[in-house]
Image (cartoon, rainbow, N blue to C red):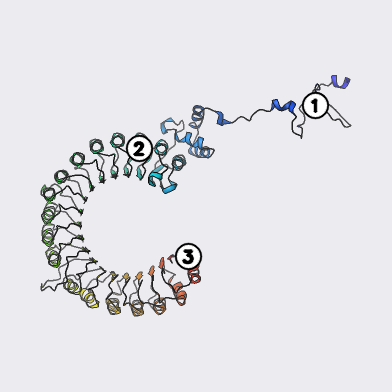
Amino acid sequence: MSGIFSFSGDEDFFNGGTMHLSPGSCPGVYLPPRKRLRVAAPSLYSAFNQKQTSIEVLPDECLFEILRRLPSGKERSACACVSKHWLNTLTSIKANESVQEVESEGFLSRSLEGNKATDLRLAAISVGTSARGGLGKLQIRGSGFESEVTDAGIESIAYGCPSLKSLSLWNLPAVSDKGLSEIARCCPKLEKLDLSRCPGVTDKGLVAIAENCRNLNDLTIDSCSGVGNEGLRGIARRCSSLRSISLRSCPRVGDQGVAFLLAQAGSYLTKVKLQMVNVTGLSLAVLGHYGVAVTDLVLSGLQGVNEKGFWVMGNAKGMKKLKSLSVTSCRGMTDVGVEAVGSGCPDLKHVSLNKCLLVSGKGLVSLAKSAASLESLKLEECHRINHFGFLGFLMSCGAKLKAFSLVNCLGIQDLNSESHLTSTSSLRSLSVRCCPGFGDASLTFLGKFCHQLQDVELCGLNGVTDAGVLSLLQSNNVGLVKLNLNGCVNVSDNAVSAVSFSHGSTLESLSLDGCKNITDASLVTVSKNCYSVNDLDVSNTLVSDHGIKALASSPNHLNLQVLSLGGCSGITDKSKACIQKLGRTLLGLNIQRCGRISSSTVDSLLEQLWRCDILY
């Protein structure tokens, strides 16, 4: 016992022998903390086991103060990985609340779609991009009422991405003015805003954008039922940098907002797009008078605009700089409107008329005579335009016309013309698709008139035969570059052979999809004469292994980049070696619906042609 009472703590308590002490047997004995017991602590010591301290027990205010003092974006990203709580706290820190300023120029671009678009991912983007140059462009395409993006996610982007310049919000019903207002307040550099199917956004959010984002130059509003005239007036008053405006299917938008916007911003707006909005001829009259800077104009589904509206727009003589006009499904666009626009817009170069059922050949001739700078015209589903109007336009058009397109115009009839014309046409591109009345007689006339064609597209024309194709191209003196005869079932190998002999040195693209009379003979002539071709489509034809072999053994060493063989039942596994040889230059190969090509051959091609995008 004397040894116990004389113990000073500087030496071992017990030396030598074996001594077993347990707290249960000797409760009064003092045991120095020299060694940790290897067994579980008895109940006597359970009161001394304390819970491990964690930073998670800190109030949010303290955690906020700690995280906002992180020295750089790298540390922020690391801390964001700790927990969702930390991530949410970091995203709530605004740029002006951070002690350490993080430079961000907005170099990065991010896009979220479908179920990948969530508030959590937006929070991660907000924190992660700040250390890597800053977020400049963000696209969010939601999934309607199942979308998991709310104002919280938009706010996290606003707080963490002050460098944001372009924002697209599509199909996000849970996003409202609250989130958009935070974007407006925290992202003053915003230049482009695209809102589509966001019913929660109203005039209030749009006004907030107008008051804070003075650099806004591109605004698109599509199917936003909450946006009305007041929001457009706010944009017109404050966004003097606005250059492009697009409005579509907004039921609360009318003349009061559109006319005010065009009157205020017409001197600097360059692109205007009005689709299915409730405006009348008043808005077009204002546009025609004040739209002095407008160069591109798209009008679609304006059922409230009558003939007078288009007439006033053209005769106001204000749109001197208009270069491109596209009109779709506007019953007010008639021959009178077409003539007025042509005479009032002297710099008009490109015109597209789609489903303008009251425009006839008379209007086309008037347009050709008044629009001296016209370079291209596209007509689609304009059924009142007949053969005489079509040819009259070409005869009356100026020497600057470069491209002409007819699509599904049922009024065109294949009539012989006795007109005698000199080859003054500068037409370079001709496209005629799905016009059942268009045939060889029309092509023969065009062949006498158009000697500089380089791009020819004749699709779905049952009335076109070899004779028509040859008549069109026989006097061509500049060299054909692209020829598309898809769906011309009466075109045969003779036409392909003649084209390859005459234009083989310049032809780069040849498409014969659905030409049922095309056989291996066409591929043989192409392989011998068309050494510049890089895009060849013979899908749904009668070509077989023999034709593929001819291409692979071409003496001109074809530099094919795209080869389409879809639906060719005559091509079998025997063509594998030839396709592999052609694959040295191929970037795209289509062998869909080739039933005689086995899966093993497909696997081999996938392995060998690893640089080529193969459809099978």
Q: Is residue 425 left or right of residue 177?
A: left
Decide which of 566, 481 is in the foreground and name it: 566
Q: Is residue 183 left or right of residue 236?
A: right
Q: Secondary structure at mark 1?
A: loop
User: Tag 3, which secondary structure?
Assistant: loop
For the residue carrying disc 2, how many other residues have a C-alpha within 10 Å: few (<14), some (14-19), or many (20+)? many
Q: Does the residue at mark 2 contact the one at mark 3 (Cβ under 8 Å)?
A: no
Specify which label sits upstream in the sequence, 3 or 1: 1
Q: Amino acid at mark 3?
A: Trp
Q: Which residue is mark 3?
A: 610
Total marks drawn? 3
User: Splitting the image into 4 quarters, where does residue 37 fall?
Assistant: top right
For mark 2, what is the residue?
A: 176
Q: Nearer the viewer, mark 3 or mark 1?
A: 1
- Which amino acid does the dot numbered 2 rest on? Ser
Would you identify the image quadrant in which residue 48 lies?
top right
Which quarter of the picture shows residue 137? top left
| Amino acid type of the residue that numbered disc 1 sits on in the rendered structure | Gly
Distance from the alpha carbon under mark 3 to that under mark 1 = 76 Å
Q: Which mark is on residue 515?
A: none
Q: Earlier in the sequence, mark 1 or mark 2?
A: 1
- From the image, tell me which residue sits under label 1: 24
- For the residues marked 1 and 2, what is the alpha-carbon distance in whole angstroms? 68 Å
Residue 602 visible in image: yes
Residue 596 in percent (x, y) is at 44, 74
